[in-house]
Amino acid sequence: MAAGGASLIAAVVFSVLIMSSLGGPMPLCSDCETMCRTNCTAEAEANCANYCYDTQSTAGYCEGCMGAYFDQHCNPECLKNCSNGCKKKVLPRPLCSDCDTVCSTKCTEELQTTCSEYCDFSRSGLADCQRQLFERCNTEGTCCSSDGTCTCDCETEARKSCVGVSDNSNNCEVCKRGQFDQDCHPTCNTDCNSNCKKKKGCHGHA
């Protein structure tokens, strides 16, 4: 399965380069996240097919396999390579008076990807806790007996048992606020004010 997974990742990773070499249109950088999510979800489903059959013996393992394949392998590599080979959308020069708003919007969007390690709930301790308890509940038959009689719901039980475990929301906000204030927004504002256009009749004032 490892060899098969590697070849699937390679297909996604080099898709941008292949399109370019064949004369196909390269994706916009703004489309990288959507393209990689779509491709890697499909690859994860194929790679984890053995765990994702709807049988009692594999219950709970499908989500764990797909999450690990998507988050740890395919999606990071795809995003990195897409961002290196994509084309940026050429936007009209903004008014100087709009630079702050333009940069706030731009940085907020970019930091969703930059801080994804902290802002992706599926990577949080809470998600990991719920995943493990859900799998254990299904494997041990905590809620449902072999005859199909159920006295509880594994998903609900996992959520209740993991109350208090961090969902990474604090780390997410720290990451985004720190990079927004110290790097992204100041740099964007400087670049914007160097290339923006002034309103007619303002005589040198933005």
Image (tube, rainbow, N blue to C red):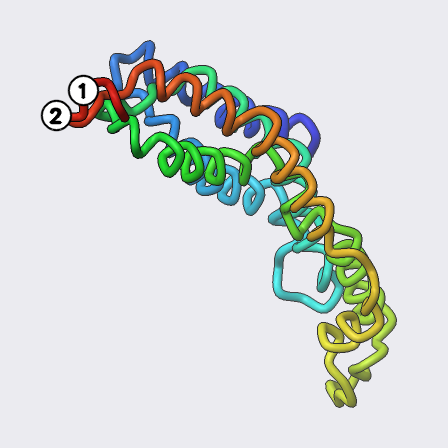
Q: Is the residue under label 1 in contact with that under label 2 (CB below 8 Å)?
A: yes
From the viewer's perspective, is 107 left or right of 66? left
Q: CA distance from mark 2 to mark 1?
A: 6 Å
Tell me: residue 52, above or below residue 123. below
From the viewer's perspective, is 194 left or right of 72? left
Residue at image location 78% in from the left, 54% down from the top: 128
Q: Is residue 19 visible?
A: yes
Crowd around label 1: few <14 · some 14–19 · many ≥20 (10 Å):
few
Tell me: residue 131, above or below residue 9. below
Residue 153, image x, y percentages: 73, 80
- State the image quarter where residue 75 is shown: top right
Look at label 2 and name its amino acid. Answer: Gly
- Total marks shown come to 2
Residue, disc 1: 203
Residue 149, image x, y percentages: 75, 89
Look at label 1 and name its amino acid. Answer: His
Residue at image location 18% in from the left, 25% down from the top: 202
Q: Quadrant of the C terminus?
A: top left
Residue, disc 2: 201
